[in-house]
Image (cartoon, coloured by chain):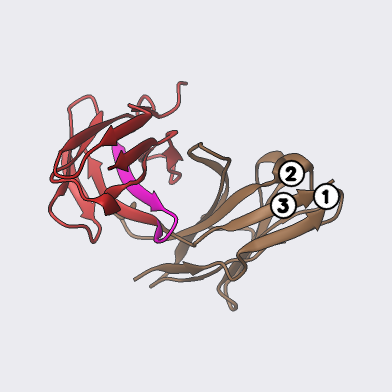
Amino acid sequence: AQSVAQPEDQVNVAEGNPLTVKCTYSVSGNPYLFWYVQYPNRGLQFLLKYITGDNLVKGSYGFEAEFNKSQTSFHLKKPSALVSDSALYFCAVRAVQYGNNRLAFGKGNQVVVIP
Amino acid sequence: KAGVTQTPRYLIKTRGQQVTLSCSPISGHRSVSWYQQTPGQGLQFLFEYFSETQRNKGNFPGRFSGRQFSNSRSEMNVSTLELGDSALYLCASSSTVTDTQYFGPGTRLTVL
């Protein structure tokens, strides 16, 4: 089984301040980890992924995430938040297994960037 | 490349009816997955098709079914609609080269 926990419902941050969205996961074996963002009435937009290699992953729009195997975490970060970053953020995991494309998502975090 | 497209974008149906949703993947992508998004349950995996075969299936009743055509386009069908089927249905495609699923804009289904 695979699952994701995003412990906070909403993250409020002032524009220009660092943004962190937390994610912990559970999966059998090695994980593939993803972050997606969703704007109102839109689908999910891919931000970044961890497959293997460096624990710090850089993605779109200045976002990055750090994979921590011992803490089973994959927190999303941005050094300086913009008002346009206000959206719903989802962490997702799937097991590294041939033929398994099934993603398990967290409940999502609403990020509000305050001008 | 064009992204994942889904039609229609919005649908209103009544209980007991059936509905078919369509998804066209990114060119070259052979895997198509479907997800249901609701405020209460969040994002839940429905099923995945690869080369016209269902490869994975989530925990949904048999009223939810799908298929994939030889051009990788996929359809999802829901029969005997219930009020609880009201949701945003998202389709995602991926290739054997990338491990990333790219999502379409979704179909918003409202069951009255």
Q: Residue at x 77, y 42 (%)?
A: A83
What's the colour of chain A in the image?
A: brown
Q: Residue at x 51, y 36 (%)?
A: A42
Is residue B94 among the parts visible in the rendering?
Answer: no
Amino acid found under the numbered disc labelled 2: Gly
**Label for residue A62?**
2
Q: Chain of mark 2?
A: A
Relative depth, front residue between A49 and B80: B80
| Label total for image | 3
Residue labelled with disc 3: A112
The quarter of the picture where the N terminus of chain A appears is: bottom left
Residue A87 spot, x, y in % from top left = 63, 46
Residue B38 in the magenta stretch? The answer is yes
Judge from the rendering whether residue A65 lies leftward or rightward of residue A103; answer left or right. Answer: right
Both labels 3 and 1 in a single chain: yes
Proximity of marks 1 and 2: CB atoms separated by less than 8 Å: yes
Q: In terms of sequence position, does the residue under pointer 3 or pointer 1 come before the other? A: 1
Dot 3 crowding, Cα within 10 Å, few <14, some 14–19, many 20+: many
Residue B53 spot, x, y in % from top left = 16, 42
Figure check: B45 above or below A31 = above
Chain shown red: that is B
Q: Residue at x 48, y 58 (%)?
A: A92
Dot 1 crowding, Cα within 10 Å, few <14, some 14–19, many 20+: some
